[in-house]
Structure formats: C-alpha cells, structure tokens
Amino acid sequence: MKKAQEVASKLMGSAYESLDERAQKVARHVAEGKHIARNVTQDYEKGTTFGQRAADRVASFGGSWIFVGLFAAVMLLWVGLNAFLVMSRGKTFDPYPYILLNLFLSMLAAIQAPVILMSQNRHSEKDRLNAEHDYEVNLKAELDIMLLHEKMDLLREKQWEELLAIQKEQLSILADLIHKKSLVP
C-alpha cells in the first residue's frame, strides 16, 4: 500500500486516497509490478443468465441473412398457398388483405423488439466495461513509460558522472605524462 501511495503521488501527482477506484487499482498494479490486462468479455460472459444468452442468440439470428431468407420464404409460401387455395377451392384460410399474417407479423415484432433491445443494452454494458478496462490498461502503460523514462534519466546521469570521472583520470594521467616528459632532457 505504501508503494501504491508513492506511485500515486510521484507519477499521478495526487494522494492515493483522492484517486478514483480505477486509478487506485492501476497504482497498486504499477507498485506491485503486476499486469492489469484481462479478457473483459470472458469475465462478463461468466455472469450472464440464460435469458441474456437467449436474447443474444435471438438478436444475432434476427439480424442475419438466414432470418431474412427464411422470413421471405415464409411470406412467399403464405401468399402462394393462399393463391393456390383460392384458385383450386375458391376459398382460403387467410383472404387477400392477409389479416392473420399481419397478426403473426405484429406478434413477432412485439416479441422480437424488446429481446433485441435487451441484447443491445447488454452489449452496451459490455462495451462500457471494455472502455473502462482500456482506460486502466492505458493509464498503467503511461505510468510504466514514465517510470522507464525516470530510470533512463538516472542511468544517463550515472553514465555522465562516470564519463566525467574517467575524463578527470585521463587528464590527470595526461598531466603526469606531460610533467614526466618535461623532466626528461
């Protein structure tokens, strides 16, 4: 916890306690050197109910070309069967304005629309969780990069100090050589 407080104050410029829950989580992960990435979709799918999974399946089927093709086939079959019955017997089970067909279509729409909305709401929630997770991963990456910059700066400063020490030693050796050469006739 102390390391997380140091990370928060040093890299984020705020007290650990003043950060929101996600930023605190990121500060803890940076301090502990742990990864933060996870499969949000897999985690989210574990908590779904049967009804939510069914709504997703209905929505994916209702928005597919297979559904459109089957829907068109049923409509053509309905109209064709009614036309055939009118020609062969003079009477049909659903005469021309197709009131029974309209009733079935209205019932299908009345059931399908809320199910699709439920699925869309669930996908919106999943997208929100993905966005929050992306924020956490991006914040951690940014903090890790800041730490790397800091380490690189420290290494560079150390190298400069070592280089200056080597140059001083070289100058000292060179001065000794010049002094010795001036002593030799």
Image: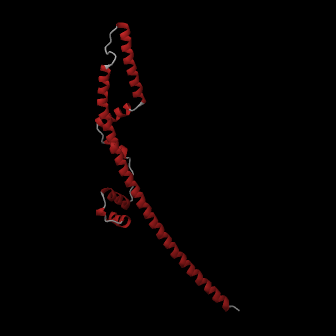
Q: Position of residue 111 (x, y in %)?
A: 29, 30
Q: In the figure, 33 relative to 45: above or below?
A: below
Quadrant in the picture for residue 53: top left
Q: Quadrant of the C terminus?
A: bottom right
Which residue, as the protein is rendered here, is positioned at the far right?
A: 185
Which residue, as the protein is rendered here, is positioned at the far front?
A: 97
Q: Is residue 105 visible?
A: yes
Which residue, as the protein is rendered here, is positioned at the far top?
A: 89
Q: Position of residue 112 (x, y in %)?
A: 31, 31
Q: Is residue 45 visible?
A: no
Q: In the figure, 154 relative to 28: above or below?
A: below
Q: Position of residue 9 (x, y in %)?
A: 34, 66
Q: Tell me what residue is drawn at x 40 percent, y 19 percent.
A: 76
Q: Quadrant of the N terminus?
A: bottom left
Total labels: the figure holds 0
Q: In the figure, 23 relative to 113: above or below?
A: below
Q: Position of residue 74 (x, y in %)?
A: 38, 21
